[in-house]
Every structure is written in structure tokens, then in C-alpha cells.
Amino acid sequence: MHFCRLILLLLLLSACGHYQEAEETKVPLIGFLDYVEDATLAQAREGFMKALSDSGFSEENKTITVVYRNAQGDQPTLLQAADYLISRKPTLIATNTTLATVNTIKRSTATPVFMMVAPRPDIARLTNAKGDAPMNLHGVYETLDYIDTSVTLIRELFPNAKVIGTIYNQAESQSSDALDRLRKGCLTAGLTLEELPVTSSSESQLVTQALLNKKIDVFFALPDNIIFSSFEVIANQCNAKNIPILTSEAGLVARGALASYGADFYQWGYQSGQQAAAFLKNPEGKYPPQEVKLRRKLINSDRAAAFGISNFQNFELLKK
């Protein structure tokens, strides 16, 4: 009898030891939430994951587990995806674009959220009455100041331009806020702004055509998820009318825009990933949201040639 009890005790101790070892070797669970499938936005995700890898965190070496969800531009799907990731009790959730960040923060006050491709917390309406951001919000934001410089590109490249056109999604705070800044920039520069609302990617073709019928001189692509996801449609229509596209988003230059001044999405994601890696190494540290570090003044030389522009030494050339 005593021998049987001794064997049972040894088995229990062995089981506890294995359980404790499993807990100690449990790798961090990383949730990643994208709002929409898009080649430009994907650069931010790639940068984020590369920064983690450079710091020793990757699925390949089994130092993290990543659970990825993409809402495909659908709001109900976005909410379900955010709820699912939060339910997994991840070490942190990375959020790509404003809507992904805002909805994840609203659904959890405990899960660390590392944002990218999103505006400053106060611009995203995420601060309290005292102006403080949520304690669980981290990552990298952009301000609206870069829009002002983006507008000056119009005068620099097309001094005779008079009418600027844009489309925007009023349901997206970053699009509406950037539009307000664009309005002010055009007013200061003595430019007329034609603007039309769009509510889905499927409307982009008709709305862009209606905008082009207003005889615009330049199309300005705002930081808008609908523009990102349907940019090739917009670019094809503008090209057919010989209308140049200027933008604040460097990633769109590779997809056919003429020039941009704004954040590099890959580096934006990389910067957020660096902060997330620091958090994984020291969860007790302080990691307040920080402003994006790298902005680029970029030009597409092929598009420049199409518009007879040869004096662009102040720009960084798009690398093919």
C-alpha cells in the first residue's frame, strides 16, 4: 500500500514538473489584425514581422506564434476578428490601419495593442478628456502635418494647375481628417478642390469618372482604405485622361502615382515591430505611442517622363 502511494506521488510530481516546464517554454502569442487586403498596407505588416524577426522573434525559430486575421474591408468581420484575437489572450495584438486599431482598443482595455498606419491617438479620437491615450495603446502614429508638404508638391511639379480632385470615405476618420487638411492646403495655395464621397471599392470607378468629368488638373490620393484597395482602377482612369496622381502615401508611387511625400509603410511597420519586440523582452517597460520617424519624398520616373517632368532632383527615385 505504501509502495503504491509512493508511486502515485512520484507520478503526480512528474506530471506537475512537465506542466511547469510547458508553461515556462510557452512562446508569446501575437495577434495581427488587418482591416483590408491591400499591397500597400501589406508592406507595413511585412515591416512589423521583419522587426520582430531581427530581434529574435519568429515562427520559423519557434519563438512566437502568430494568429493573423484580415477583415477584407468589412466592418462586421473586423469586429468579429478583433473579438476572436482578444479571446485568444495574446501577448499583444498588432493593428494595421485606423479602423483596426480603434475597434480593437474599444473592445479591450487590457490587451497591449501596437498600431501602425494610423493617426495620432487624439486624431483617431482615442484620448480621454485629459488628452491621455489608452494605457494599452502602443506602436507608431502619423500626424496630419505631412499633408501640407504633400500639397506643395502640386505647385512644385505643376505650377499651372488650378483644380485638384479627390475622393474620400467619410466613414474613415483618417480620410475625413486628411481631407480637411487638404482643403486648407489648397486654400492656402490658391487651388480649387473638387471632392466626391465614396462608400465602397465597388463605387471607385464611377465616382472617379465623375470626378474626372469636372476637368481636374491633378488627382490627390488621400490616406483612405478605399483608395488603397481600388488604386489600380483609379490610376487606370486617371492615366486614360492624362491626369497625374499625387499622394501622401509612398507605397502608391510604386502602384502608379507620380509622386508622394509621406511615411514609408514598410518602415512604419518596422518601427512598430521594434517597439513590440522591446515589449516582448521587457513587458514591464513603458512604450507610449510614438510618431513615425521616416517620411519620403518619392517620384516615379516613368510617370514623370509621361508628363514631361525631368527636373526632380529634390525627389528620391522609386527603386524598381
Image (cartoon, grey):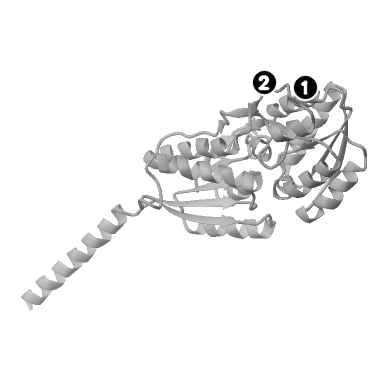
Q: Residue at x 62, y 28 (%)?
A: 296
Image-quadrant location for residue 168: top right
Query: Which residue ends up furthest to the right in the rendered image?
Result: 214
Query: Which residue ends up furthest to the bottom in the rendered image?
Result: 1
Question: Which of the two residues, 279 or 206, is positioned nearer the viewer here?
Answer: 206
Question: Where is residue 288 drawn, in percent x and y?
Answer: 51, 33
Identify the residue under disc 1.
Answer: 156
Position of 237 with respect to 67 (left or right) is right
Q: Residue at x 73, y 21 (%)?
A: 311
Do callouts 2 and 1 mark residues in contact (Cβ within 8 Å)?
yes
Q: Which mark is residue 258?
A: none
Amino acid type, residue under disc 2 in the picture: Asn
Question: Which of the two residues, 108 or 190, is positioned nearer the viewer here?
Answer: 190
The N terminus - image quarter? bottom left
Q: Residue at x 56, y 56 (%)?
A: 69
Question: Where is residue 294 drawn, in percent x and y?
Answer: 57, 29
Amino acid type, residue under disc 1 in the picture: Glu
Q: Is residue 167 above or below residue 150?
A: below
**Crowd tier of the residue under label 1, counting other residues whose Cα lies within 10 Å: few below 14, some 14–19, many 20 or above:** few
For marks 2 and 1 on the same chain, the one whose residue lies earlier in the sequence? 1
Q: Secondary structure at mark 2?
A: loop
Residue 120 can be seen, yes or no: yes
Q: Is residue 120 above or below residue 315?
A: below
Q: Residue at x 82, y 42 (%)?
A: 238
Identify the residue under disc 2.
Answer: 314
The C terminus - image quarter? top right
Position of 208 with respect to 125 (left or right) is right
Residue 142 can be seen, yes or no: no
**Crowd tier of the residue under label 2, counting other residues whose Cα lies within 10 Å: few below 14, some 14–19, many 20 or above:** few
Question: Which of the two residues, 297 or 26, is positioned nearer the viewer here?
Answer: 297
Question: Where is residue 12 drawn, in percent x and y?
Answer: 19, 67
